[in-house]
Structures are given as C-alpha cells and as structure tokens.
Amino acid sequence: MENEFHRDYKDRVIPALQQRHRYKNVHEVPRVTKVVVNTSVGSQPDVKQALDEAKAELALITGQFPLETRAKKSIANFKLRKDQLIGAKVTLRGDRMYEFLERLIKAALPRIRDFRGVSPRCFDGHGNYTLGVPDQTIFPEVELDKIKRNIGFDVTIVTTARTDEEAKSLLSEMGMPFSDRAKKIAPTSPSEGGPAGQAQAA
C-alpha cells in the first residue's frame, strides 16, 4: 500500500512546484531519491559497546538494519586507526524513506526543545540537505527509560533538484519546517540558482 506522505507528494507537491517554478514537464519536478542517516561513536571510550547501541537505535528509528562504517585514515591525536569501526549508517529509499521523512518532519523535529525550525543554510550547493539531530529521544519510537547514552546523528536528504533553491522549495512543500518559512518564496525559473551554505540545524 502506498505511503500517504508519498501520495501527498504526487497529488499536491508536484502540482505546486510545477506552478511555482514553471516546469514544462512533470519529470523536471525535483524528488527525494534517498535519505542517509549516519552516526559516529569514534570519540566514545567504549567504541564497541557504543556502536552496538547506536546500531540498535538506528534500526529502531529507521526500521532498517544499519551498516557499520570504518575510518578512512589513521589520526594519532584522536587515537584513530585506519579501517577501525567508528559508526553506522542507514540508506533509505522508497516507502521506508517516505515513512521516515513523515515521522521526522511531523513528529520528531517538533519535539526538540525550544524548536524554531531547521536552518535554511544546510544545503550543499547541489540540492542536497543535511541536518544534525542532537539525540535519538526526539523520535517517539524510542523508550526514554531504556536509553543508555544519547546518540546524535546526521540526516542527509538527497534530491534531484538542480539548485539549492529548488531543493528548498521541494522540502518546504513536503512540510520541512525551515526557520525562515514565514518568508514568501517568489516564483523562479529552473535556470535560476540559490545561495549555498553549510550550518547545523537550529
């Protein structure tokens, strides 16, 4: 059965973006292709235990078993060895991706204390957006009394947008609560770009 969030994208978001950016073809409309959830525990004194806990938390939050990630090079100051296990990540596509985005946008982010929206400056210049999540407790699936340590992670939303402005329009229409969402977005053509920058989510 098709996810309601995905159906809303097709029924409402696509027409809205076509009108705003004057796309001539429906295939020009940006879409989300995958979501990558990544965490690192390399700074923890008990890396093996921390990694096991991080993998369990990511699996609970995303509904998919995570892959382990390794250090790409040795860094003596951080007591890091090349190929050492330091984190975990999950790559979501299809229905699981839309289900996760729906829970992130509608349930998890509003649970952040003093939340005023996510930063609009976290795009990478190629239409992809990354936000930092302080800890796993913002997700309703997590049972607070079973948490042994706070695990922060990054969520990267990869889109087919050609510019950051188009990507922001896409995510805004899907409900992403940007901190400047009160500002009206003027119609633009597909050839017009937007400012790129990097910052942590508010």
Image: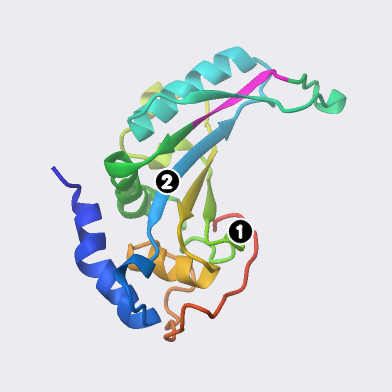
Q: Residue at x 47, y 64 (%)?
A: 161
In percent of width and height, residue 90 lies at: 46, 33
Name the image quarter holding residue 80. Answer: top right
Say which of 19 and 202 sits in front: 19
Q: Which residue is drawn at 46% across and 67% down?
A: 168
* Crowdedness near tag 1: few (<14), some (14–19) or many (≥20) residues, C-alpha within 10 Å: some
Q: What element carries label 2?
A: strand
Residue type at mark 1 is Asp
Q: Which residue is drawn at 53% across and 66% down?
A: 120
Q: Is mark 1 on a helix, strand or loop?
A: loop
In this picture, residue 59 sits left or right of residue 75 = left
Residue at the farthest right position: 76
In the picture shown, does residue 21 fall above or below 109?
A: below
Residue 86 located within the stretch drawn in magenta: yes
Give the Cα distance between marks 2 and 1: 15 Å
Instruction: Tell me whether circle 2 and circle 1 mark residues in contact (CB < 8 Å).
Output: no
Residue that label 1 marks:
124
Which of the marked residues, 2 or 1, is nearer the chain's N terminus?
A: 2
In percent of width and height, residue 140 lies at: 31, 39
Residue that label 2 marks:
34
In percent of width and height, residue 126 lies at: 58, 61
- Main SS category, magenta section: strand
Range of magenta residues: 83-89
Q: Can residue 37 be seen in this view?
A: yes
Q: Which residue is drawn at 57% across and 75% down?
A: 194
Residue 39 located within the stretch drawn in magenta: no
Quadrant of the rendering where the N terminus is positioned: top left
